[in-house]
Image (cartoon, coloured by chain):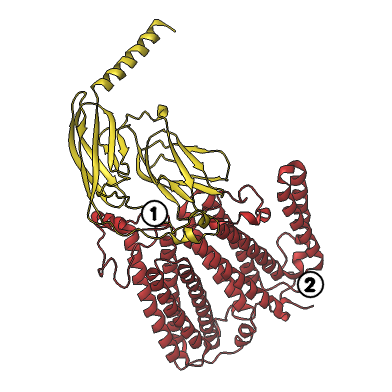
Chain colours: A yellow, B red
Amino acid sequence: MTNKTLALIVSTSLAAALQNVCAGDITGTITLKGTPPKERDITPLKDDANCGKFHSTMPTTHFYVVGPNQELADVIVSVQGMSGKSTGASAPGVALNQQGCEYKPQILAVQTGEKITIKNSDPVLHNVHAVPKADGNKEMNAPQLPGSGDLTVSFDKPEPFLKFQCDVHPWMFAWVSVFDHPYFAVSARDGTFKIANVPPGKYTIQAAHRKAGVVTQQVEVKEGAPAKVDFTLEAK
Amino acid sequence: MSNVRSSPWFHRFALLTAAATLALLSVGGLVTSHGAGMAVPDWPNTYGYNMFFFPTSQWLGGIFYEHTHRLAASAVGFLTTILALWLFGRSARPFMRRAGLVLFAIGAATALATPRHWTDGAVLGVTGVALLAAGFVWPRCEPAAKWMRYLGGAALLGVILQGMLGGLRVVLKEDQLGILHAVLGQLFFTLLCAIALFTSRWWQRSGAGINLSPAGLPGLRAVWLMGAGAWLLILLQLGIGAAMRHQHAGLALSDFPLAHGKLWPATDPASVEMYNQQRKEILSVNPITAFQIVLQMVHRMVAVAILGAVAAYAWFTRRILGGRHPASRAAWVWLALVLTQGALGAATIWSDKAADVATAHVVVGALLLATGALVCIVNYRELALARAALLPARPASDWTQAPFGPQPAGAGRFPGT
């Protein structure tokens, strides 16, 4: 290794470390205002000769996953105006599982170039059909037999709520938001989220839910200090 | 020597092929209604298997609909091939023998050269042997008239093109090809119905004479134009309906007779976003767009126009040709189908696009298109025969007569023989 290369690695690492030291986390909670509509029974799933066996009760949709104090899960929270900073190639990746003839989780987020590992935990065949809309993201339609190896896919362009579906079982779908930066999070079941290591600055933060819509707020991240921003979305 | 005309079996076979095609359209409708068009991701194979060897244990969920559709399409292709060859009578024999030998050779070579694909070779080889054997026992009848042979050839080309469109729609993942596939499928069905009409005894007998109505040529021309206009509206409606279904967005309008609670729904971005948010879809459908909302409104308006056009046509035809004329009777059948189709369209929305209801809407649509085409053909022949009777300088074309009349020497050769 030459001295030049060594110097480059050291300086890059230092810069990254310095950025992390200066960077702050954005945390907050998402709350739902109003009463969400009743979830629908997925009767085709229960009626299916193979998949119905995996459910002892009637499976339902999961449009609004709401906690006892109106905490809202499955909201994609992201920092706006951060394009072109993807670290997806070196990111750990995310998993999308097919279990009980349902995609789990149904909402997730990744960076461009980040690997999505698709598993089939069911003893039945699924076909994994990703249907992107953004130019540059390739459609994928691949069979996945029970017990077969995982499939992997990644997307090159940012796209909100990119749909995954299974055409063998048309009630199965998941939504993946793709960002070209690492500054995003998906709210947990208790409605909380955390976007880590955001560089200092003033930002617009967006909270997007497939059914409750999109809201934004301004927030300032100061050097090394956490910032907090809570969102309230209205049930539609 | 006998000709095809002397055998009512050809007409029955044409009816069988048309009926099989209607069944195929039903299965195709179920494929789209169940969102199963991409359930088998490869073509012409099925999950790597030759489609005829795909294990029945794997016919699950959406695969069942898509794979059944492919098998039914193969059956219709087989029937259409027989139909087209039959129209060439004895002159098809040499072609069948040669084509059978070629297919057998290709099948054997495939099986020997690529043992992993022996099933593909077996299917080709068996098809070749069957064609070769049929070439020895094929009916020795006279070929049909040239225009009938053209129709048979068009049907054969149509079924091949239709199969390729369906396959390419899967392989290329192009929804637009699905729209073409849907429209061409119904036009192909209409063509088979026309062949069945031309080979019917009724067509061959009723072309012998013409009873001019008091309205004369202008009246007949008006009947033909009104029918053709209504049929074109139905064709337009088919294109709109196919475009709606093959965007896989479910119902762009969830209520009827209103549209999102209004006479004309809002289509601004905020309203469309709200419609999508309020939708609680069970099946995997795409979000709706303003374009799809407008398209569905146009579909409703064209439906009203079709009802008006066919009702006016039925009333006018009865006035011009009399209530006992076959065209008048057919007009009432046509109108009844329009009303049924309207009811099914409403039921499709009220049932939240239940697969069986939506598919019935597709099937009755196909019957509407075919019935309209047959009505127009009959009307046009009436007009042509009347012109020939009144204007001897303009004799009617031979298509107005029986399609299996005497042939000039050397006519009806199979291409390449």
Q: Name the residue at 28% across, 43% down.
A: A191
Work out whether mark 2 precedes mark 1 in sequence or the reverse, and give the earlier one.
2
For mark 1, give the secondary structure. loop
Residue at horizontal 48 percent and vertical 47 percent from the top: A99
Q: Is residue A198 above or below residue B148?
A: above
Q: Distance from label 2 to label 1 (Cα)? A: 55 Å
Is residue B172 in sight in this rendering? yes
Look at label 1 and name its amino acid: Asn
- Callout 1: 10 Å neighbours few (<14), some, many (20+)? some
Q: In which quarter of the image is the N terminus of chain B?
A: bottom right
Q: What residue would you read off at disc 2?
A: B140
Question: B316 or B345: which is nearer to us?
Answer: B345
Q: Is residue B225 visible?
A: no
Q: Which chain does the numbered disc 2 sit on?
A: B
Q: In this view, does A155 lie to the left or right of B74?
A: left
Q: Which of A90 and A26 is in front in this view?
A: A26
Please give the label number shown on residue B286.
Answer: 1
